Amino acid sequence: MKFIDEATIDVAAGDGGSGCVSFRREKFIPFGGPNGGDGGRGGSVYALADRNLNTLIDYRYARRHEARNGEPGRGSDQFGAAGADVVLRMPVGTIISDADSGEMLAELLEDGQKVLLAKGGDGGFGNLHFKSSTNRAPRQKTPGWPGEKKRLALELRVLADVGLLGMPNAGKSTLIAAISNARPKIADYPFTTLRPNLGVVRVGPERSFVVADIPGLIEGASEGAGLGHQFLRHLQRTRLLLHVVDLAPFDEGADPVAQARAIVLELEKYDPALHAKPRWLVLNKLDLLPPEERAARVRDFVRRLRWKGPVFEISALAREGLQPLVEKIQQHLSAQQQVPAPPDPRFDRPKEGADHE
């Protein structure tokens, strides 16, 4: 299935039904009185988070969603029926914003979370509603209220604990396939990954975490170069970033240190909050280096990069060094379990009243 993480839709709630003017007319009852019922409420439009969905592709093609209008009132004290509601199922992690103002309206973070998007209009009053001791034969009624109409922007940000970032062909897909149940496409050419991949890493019977792999970044990604910039938003919910570096690049003229610095710079340009997340260095493809050169190559890389945070030496293809990495990630996430994820500053609304390693 094609991965779609953005869509724009129009939603329209139903209008309320109008009230009715009617009087009771029966034999031997000369003063039956008013019996016109109220109109029915218009249907509303809701969003429902569904963990079984992982894309917004349904809303790329079905962009108009309307709820039914309420029925008008009738005589004999009959109120109009309410219009049926419309429930739009969306993936967990969807952000719903007003397409015109940009204001965030809702954020679906839990399976089964239900949010009102457009409220249906209330039904109008029939003349039964206006009767009183001084107005015994009212002929007033009111029309139904219109339902809300909105143009909404949908944006999906996958929910993951750990995010992988790095240059194309750094071995991110191989890594997520080696430690989780994900089965991404793996090949010996750049930009093999064209969409985010999620994998569940099971450390123990009741210990697991979710890893997200996005397309590789290149220099200029923050300005739109390459593919990775389109999916960097999926790393904004993570608690830990793993910077995967290829220590044995296929191009002998490539400098891994310069590539690592370019990734960090693009990350900072795209979102300073994302750049400030805890980030660990994962040096991959050590199996391609002679055993006697590995330690010296790692020390030289860390020294030139001036890296002060955690460093892990692995070979995702040969599955070397993966278990210590997974255990450290689980320990880090367990320690941070009680700490809520920092909110996205772009969506802070005052009215609604990590350390860098």
Image (cartoon, grey):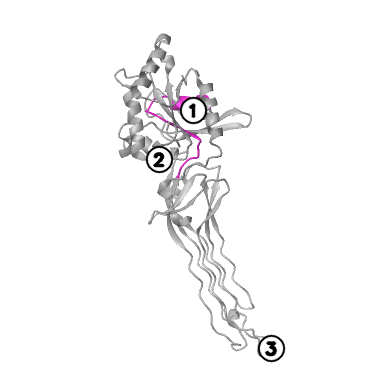
The one nearer the camera, 84 or 309, is 309
Number of marks drawn: 3
Which residue is drawn at the image coordinates 56% and 42% (left, top)?
52
Q: Secondary structure at mark 3?
A: loop
User: Between 233 and 356, which is closer to the camera in this rendering?
Assistant: 356
The answer to whether one can see residue 269 in this image is yes
Q: Could you tell me if residue 227 is visible in this image?
A: no
Residue under pointer 3: 29
Give coordinates of residue 309: x percent, y percent.
Answer: 43, 27
Report the side of 26 relative to 289 (left or right).
right
Graded by Cα atoms within 10 Å as few (under 14), some (14 to 19) or many (20 or more), the crowding at tag 3 reads few
Mark in front: 1 vs 2: 2
Q: Earlier in the sequence, mark 1 or mark 2?
A: 1
Instruction: Name the residue: 50% across, 19% down.
Output: 321
Q: Residues within 10 Å of mark 2 (few under 14, many from 20)?
A: some
Q: CA distance from mark 2 to mark 3?
A: 76 Å
- Three-letter residue code for mark 3: Ile
Q: Amino acid at mark 1?
A: Ile
Q: Quadrant of residue 33?
A: bottom right
Q: State yes or no: residue 178 in magenta.
A: yes
Circle 2 sits on which residue?
Answer: 273
Q: Vertical placement of 31 versus 355: above or below? A: below
Q: Residues within 10 Å of mark 1 (few under 14, many from 20)?
A: many
Residue 109, image x and y in percent? 52, 46
Residue named by callout 1: 176
Residue range in magenta is 156-179
The CA distance from mark 1 to mark 3 is: 81 Å
